[in-house]
Structure formats: structure tokens, C-alpha cells
């Protein structure tokens, strides 16, 4: 996995609800100048790449000019973006989907509910942002919109966020501040870490399987080469062979543990980088060492390790008569080893499964803490 972490955020909503203003408010002034973004589809969705830190790149997909009530054409646009990245599912590309509704409109249309439901299916991380919340007398409308979105689109209360993207000077000379961005940033962080957390255990599993298969292959080759026609049950060779199997299996266990630590730390680094970047408005502050949980490495039990001395003894008891007998012994010894190796391969695979589960749990712990701190 590259050291750089990228997150993709999609902003959708009908024309004029305040999507571009929201982008600029969250990620700095004039990030998305109208038309300055690179068109990623023929029309409708523009992307801007914002390096938030050397390790963290944010790709912001701002949709604009989308006609209301044309859900099919919206979906086509989104899928054009996915196709460009050779991705099938919305959730596989977008770590956060922001659906904007204007509190000024005071209602949620069926079209919006349909879109929110479609975007949020399969547990995709959808945030509904109510814009224009600074407008006078919108409180009642906001409460009604909130209940409707929860009831009809299945969005959790914490994923509906009230925002004003503009600071204004009133006639009285007082200025009102823009608000709501902290919560959005927090959700983006949680969603990003969620997606990383899902990826890290997959990487560990792939790494482990590759190592285990390699180990198995090497050991098989050793058996093939060493259990020869002449003296197939040599005790001296057997000891060094078993020792090699043991040591190389232990080495794999260690490598898996190291990889697990590295993947966890990598995920954690991304998180702290992201936190630091937004330290001014991040809701969660962490120190680097505070939360790194210790990963306890599972050791393969000694008694589960390969022990073939019995096999040697048994085979020696077979009277060695002529060529045929020798072949039989050679084949039997090899078969015995193959079985032993298969048994140990299964043990290593079980061990890997435990490690992948532990990594998943450890990453989940950070995510849960983040969720709680909201
Ligand atoms: N008072 C207030 N005005 C806002 C807010 N958000 C956006 N606006 C104003 O609403 C108008 C439309 O905002 P845009 O950000 O251009 O809307 P958009 O959703 O990007 O529109 P399209 O790109 O056409 O799809 C602009 O005049 C903004 O200044 C808000 O939170 N409060
Ligand atoms: Mg716009």
C-alpha cells in the first residue's frame, strides 16, 4: 500500500442548494471556483484534488447544474465516474457522500428521498447536509426535514448536519459566522478510517496467504530433494529437515505479526495526519502514542510443530528388500511429510485468520472511539 492516503468525497444535490459554497467553506476559500475544476464526466461532476497534507489527498467531486427529478441521469453520471476508475459500487470509490438539501426549501421531496436511499444502500456512508441554516425562521422546517429523512430515508440522526456556509454582515453591523463544518470533517475522518480499516485486514490476509503458500512450496521441494532413493529415512537429515520446517514456519508467524503491526500503524498514521491537518477544527485530538494497542502475537504451540521421528522409526522397521522396497519407503516417507506439511499449513492458516481478526478488532476500536467522541 502506498504511503499516501486518498479519500474521495462526492457532493450531490439540486442546483442552487449550496454545494459549491459548502466545498469552499469546508476546504478553504475558493477551492471550487465555478468551472475551474476538471470535468470528469461530460457534464455535471467536477473534481478538485486538494492535498491536505503530504500523506493525505482529498478528491472532491462537486456536482453542479444537475436537474431535479432526473434520478436516472444522476446515477448515470455517478457511474461514469466509477467506470473511469474501474469500480462497480459507489461505496467502493466514495468514502463520503454528501447530499445537500436547502433548509430554505422547507421540504424534502420524494425525489430527494429516493436519491438518498439509493446512495445509502449497502451501508454506503451518506451524510445529509442541510444548507442555508442561517436563514431566518428555518428552525421548524429543519426539525421536520430531519424527522422525515430519518423516517423515510433511513439516515441516522448524527448523519444529518446543519450548516451555514456563509458568514454575513447583517444590517445591524453584526456578523454571523458560518457553522457546521467540524461535524462534516469529523464524519469524513470516520468514514476514511472505516475504509482503511476494511482494507488493512484484507492486505494482511493476502500477505499471509502468499507467505504460507511460499513456505508450503519450499518445504515440499525440500522433501522431494532430500527424501532420496538412497537412505530415505536418514535420521540426521530428518532432524535438520524438521528444524528447517519449524524455523521457517516460525519466521512466517513473525512476518505476519510484523506486517500486522505495520498495517495497523499505517492506518493509525493516516488518522493522526488527518487529525493534525484539521487540528483547528477537529473534534478529536490524539497524541501519537496514546491509542496504539498492543498486538499480542499468537505462537504456534510446540506440540503442533512437525514431528516426524515416529515416521522414521516405523519405516525403518519395514525390511528393506530390493529396489521395490526402497521405492516404497521413499514414497511413503514423502507422503508422510506431505501430510505433516499440509497439517502445519492449516495451522498457519488458522493462525493467520486469528491475526486478521485481531487487526480488524484493533482498528475497529479506534473507529468506535471516534464515533463515541462525536
Ligand atoms: N445564506 C446562505 N446562502 C448560501 C448558503 N450556501 C449557499 N448559499 C448561496 O446560495 C447560492 C447558491 O450556492 P451554490 O454553492 O452556487 O449552489 P450549488 O449547489 O453549487 O449550485 P449548482 O452548482 O448550480 O448546482 C449562492 O448565492 C450562495 O452564496 C448558506 O449556507 N447560507
Ligand atoms: Mg455549484
Image (cartoon, rainbow, N blue to C red):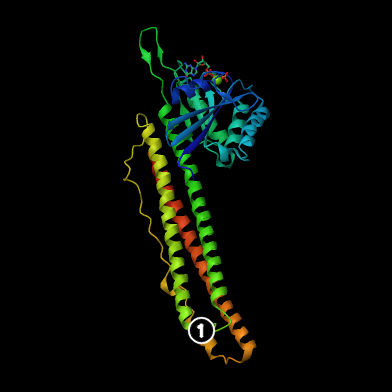
Horizontally, residue 366 falls left or right of residue 332, namely: left
Q: Residue at x 67, y 31 (%)?
A: 76
Numbered disc 1: secondary structure: helix
Q: Residue at x 50, y 67 (%)?
A: 347
Q: Residue at x 50, y 36 (%)?
A: 7
Is 371 rendered above or below residue 112?
below
Badge 1: residue crowd in 10 Å (few <14, some 14–19, many ≥20): some
The percent coordinates of residue 36 (x first, y second) are 54, 20
Q: Residue furthest top?
A: 171
Is 287 rendered above or below residue 144?
below
Q: Can you identify the residue that label 1 sits on? A: 312
The percent coordinates of residue 320 (x first, y second) are 58, 91
Name the quarter showing ligand 2: top right
Q: Nearer the viewer, residue 233 or 252?
A: 233
The percent coordinates of residue 177 (x first, y second) are 38, 18
Q: Nearer the viewer, residue 34 or 3?
A: 3
Horizontally, residue 102 falls left or right of residue 253, namely: right
- Is residue 371 visible to us here? no
Amino acid at each position: 500500500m502506498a504511503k499516501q492516503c486518498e479519500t474521495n468525497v462526492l457532493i450531490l444535490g439540486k442546483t442552487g442548494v449550496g454545494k459549491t459554497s459548502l466545498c469552499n467553506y469546508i476546504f478553504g476559500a475558493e477551492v471550487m471556483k465555478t468551472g475551474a475544476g476538471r470535468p470528469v464526466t461530460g457534464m455535471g461532476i467536477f473534481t478538485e484534488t486538494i492535498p491536505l497534507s503530504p500523506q493525505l489527498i482529498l478528491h472532491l467531486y462537486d456536482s453542479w447544474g444537475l436537474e431535479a427529478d432526473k434520478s436516472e441521469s444522476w446515477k448515470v453520471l455517478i457511474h461514469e465516474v466509477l467506470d473511469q476508475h474501474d469500480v462497480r459500487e459507489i461505496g467502493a470509490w466514495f468514502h463520503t457522500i454528501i447530499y445537500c438539501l436547502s433548509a430554505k426549501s422547507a421540504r424534502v421531496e420524494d425525489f430527494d428521498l429516493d436519491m438518498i436511499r439509493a446512495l445509502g444502500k449497502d451501508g454506503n456512508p451518506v451524510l445529509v447536509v442541510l444548507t442555508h441554516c442561517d436563514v431566518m425562521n428555518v428552525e421548524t422546517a429543519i426539525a421536520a426535514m430531519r424527522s422525515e429523512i430519518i423516517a423515510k430515508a433511513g439516515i441516522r440522526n448524527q448523519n444529518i448536519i446543519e450548516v451555514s456556509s456563509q458568514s454575513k454582515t447583517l444590517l445591524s453591523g453584526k456578523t454571523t459566522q458560518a457553522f457546521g463544518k467540524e461535524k462534516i470533517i469529523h464524519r469524513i475522518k470516520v468514514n476514511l478510517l472505516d475504509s482503511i480499516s476494511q482494507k488493512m485486514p484484507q492486505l494482511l490476509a493476502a500477505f499471509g496467504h502468499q507467505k504460507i503458500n511460499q513456505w508450503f512450496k519450499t518445504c515440499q521441494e525440500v522433501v522431494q530433494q532430500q527424501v532420496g532413493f538412497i537412505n530415505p529415512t536418514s535420521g540426521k537429515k530428518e532432524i535438520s529437515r524438521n528444524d528447517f520446517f519449524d524455523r521457517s514456519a516460525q519466521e512466517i508467524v513473525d512476518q505476519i505479526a510484523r506486517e500486522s503491526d505495520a498495517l495497523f500503524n499505517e492506518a493509525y498514521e493516516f488518522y493522526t495526519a488527518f487529525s493534525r491537518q484539521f487540528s483547528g477544527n477537529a473534534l478529536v485530538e490524539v497524541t501519537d502514542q496514546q491509542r496504539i494497542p498492543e498486538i499480542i502475537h499468537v505462537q504456534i504451540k510446540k506440540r503442533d510443530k512437525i514431528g516426524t521421528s515416529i515416521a522414521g522409526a516405523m519405516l525403518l522397521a519395514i525390511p528393506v528388500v530390493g529396489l521395490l522396497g526402497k521405492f516404497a519407503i521413499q514414497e511413503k516417507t514423502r507422503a508422510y511429510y506431505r501430510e505433516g506439511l499440509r497439517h502445519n499449513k492449516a495451522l498457519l492458516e488458522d493462525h493467520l485468520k486469528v491475526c486478521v481478526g485481531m487487526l480488524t478488532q484493533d482498528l475497529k476500536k479506534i473507529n468506535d472511539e471516534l464515533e463515541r467522541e462525536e
